[in-house]
Image: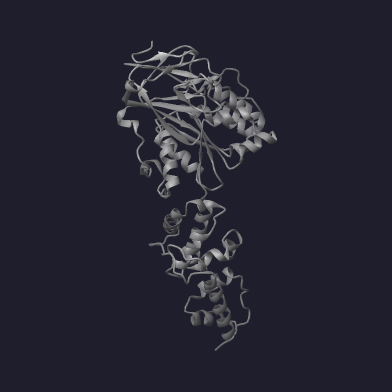
Amino acid sequence: MIGKGWRIDDVGTAKIKTDCVNDGLTLSVIAAHTLTTHPLPSEGAVTIGRSAKAIVRIDDASVSRAHAILQLGATCYVEDLGSLNGTRVGGTRLEPRRRQAIAIGEAVEIGSVTVVVLSASHAAPPPPHAPTASTLPGWVVVRDPAMVRLYELAERVAQGTISVLLLGETGTGKEVLAEAIHRASPRHKRPLLCLNCAALSENLLESELFGHEKGAFSGAIAAKPGLLETAHGGTVFLDEIGEMPLALQAKLLRVLEERRITRVGGLKPIPIDVRFIAATHRELEQEIRKGTFRQDFFYRLNGISLVIPALRERPAEIAELAEAFLQRASREAGRREAPPIAEEAMALLQRHSWPGNIRELRNVMERAVLTCVDDPVITLAHLPVEKMLATGTSAESLTRPGPAAATQTDLGFADDERSRIVDALNKCGGNQSHAARLLGISRGTLGVRLATYGLPRPRKRTSF
C-alpha cells in the first residue's frame, strides 16, 4: 500500500515528498567501513537498491538494482524483490516477495550491507567515543580519532548478524576487535570460539570446524561436535582466513549460505546459528586474482570490512600502550611497582615505525622489565636500540624533538653513552665492576648496555 503523499513513477519506485518525512525515523546504512543515514516517511513504501531510481540508493556490488522494499506504518515490514544476493533478518534469508515484520533497531542484511530502521532516540549517530570498559580487555587503549571511529562503528555492527572481515597488518589487534564485537553483541552470553586457520592442516581444520562421526578417519574413536556446532548462538572468529585451503573455502561458503553443517563422515545436516568474524593481513583481492582465494567466499565473508590502522598511524596511543604493557609485565615479574620510562626512551618508542605493531611493543616492554632489574628507570640501555634502528626508526627521526622528549634526545645520546662506556672500560683495564662504578651504574646494567651497543665483554680483568 502506498501512503499519503506518495506517488509511483514509471518503474514503480516510490518518491518521498518533503512534507511527509517523519523526523522520528531514519535508516542507517552500514556498507564497507562507512555509515550513512537517510530520513524515512511516517508511512508507505521505501525502495532500496543500487539503481538511481531507488529511494535509498546503495552503491555496492552485492546489492541488486531493485533489491528490497520497506513498508512503514504501525508495523514495519521488509520484502525482498527477488535480489541476487538475498535479504536476511536474524540470519535467515527471506523468500522473495514475502513480507517479514521487523522491529525498530533490528538489523536487516541487504546483500553484504546492513540497514537498520532507527527511532528518534537512536537516529542521530552519537559522537565518537571510547568503547566501554566492558567490551575491551584491560590493556587496550583506544584514543586515536581513527580508532575511536572504528570501535564506534564496530559497536553498531555488533548488533546485527552480518559477517565481519577484519583487515590490517600482523599484530594490530584484530583478535581484540573481534572480542569487542562479540562482547557488544546480543550473543555475548554465548561462546566466542577462535580458530587460527594457519595453524592446522586441511584435514584437521575441517574436523575442527565441522566435527566428525565415529570412524570417519583413523583415530576417530568417538563422535565429536565441531567448532561451528558448539558455538551455536555465539560467534566464531576465523583468524588468518587467507591461509584457508580452497577446498575448505568451498565447504565453508555453503555453511555461510545455508547455515547448516555436516560432520566429517556424517550424512545428516545440522542447523547452526553463528556469527562469523574473519581476519587476515593478506590482500584478499590479490589472492583472488592469483587463484588462491575464492571470490564468492570473499563476498560472503566481507559483509562489512573493518580496517585496523597500523600502530605507526596512531602515535597518540603508543605511550599509554607502553605504560599498560609495562604495568602488566612488572606484575608478572613480581615487581611491586613498574619502573618509569625515561624521556629519551619514550622518544624512541614514539618514533619507531613498529613493523610488528602492538605485538612488537608488548615484547619490547616485557624485555625492558627483565633487563632493568637493578635500575629504577627504563632508559635506552634497556631497549633494543640497534634492532629498532635497523627495522624502521631512522636516525633523522630520532633527532626531531617529540611530545615527550627534550631536544637533546637524539641518536647522539646513544652514541655518546657508547663512547663513555668504551672510555670507562679502557681506563679500568677492562674491569667491568670498576667501569660500572666509574659510570655510576650497576654491573648488571653495564652488561645490558654492552649487549645493547654490540660491545664485546672484556676478558681482561685488572686489579686496582
Q: Residue 216 in the image: x percent, y percent?
A: 64, 25
Compared with 149, 300 (above or below) is above
Q: Residue 292 in the image: x percent, y percent?
A: 67, 34
Quadrant in the rendering for residue 290: top right
Quadrant in the rendering for residue 215: top right
Q: Residue 210 in the image: x percent, y percent?
A: 57, 27
Compared with 162, 414 (above or below) is below
Q: Give the total number of marks visible in the rendering.
A: 0
Nearer-the-camera pick, 223 or 46: 46
Q: Residue 176 in the image: x percent, y percent?
A: 47, 43
In this image, 52 relative to 376: left or right? right
Q: Identify the image quadrant of the C terminus.
A: bottom right
**Is residue 385 in view from this perspective?**
no
Compared with 463, 131 (above or below) is above
In this image, 307 relative to 293: left or right? left
In this image, 69 relative to 291: left or right? left
Nearer-the-camera pick, 332 or 115: 115
**Is residue 175 in view from this perspective?**
yes
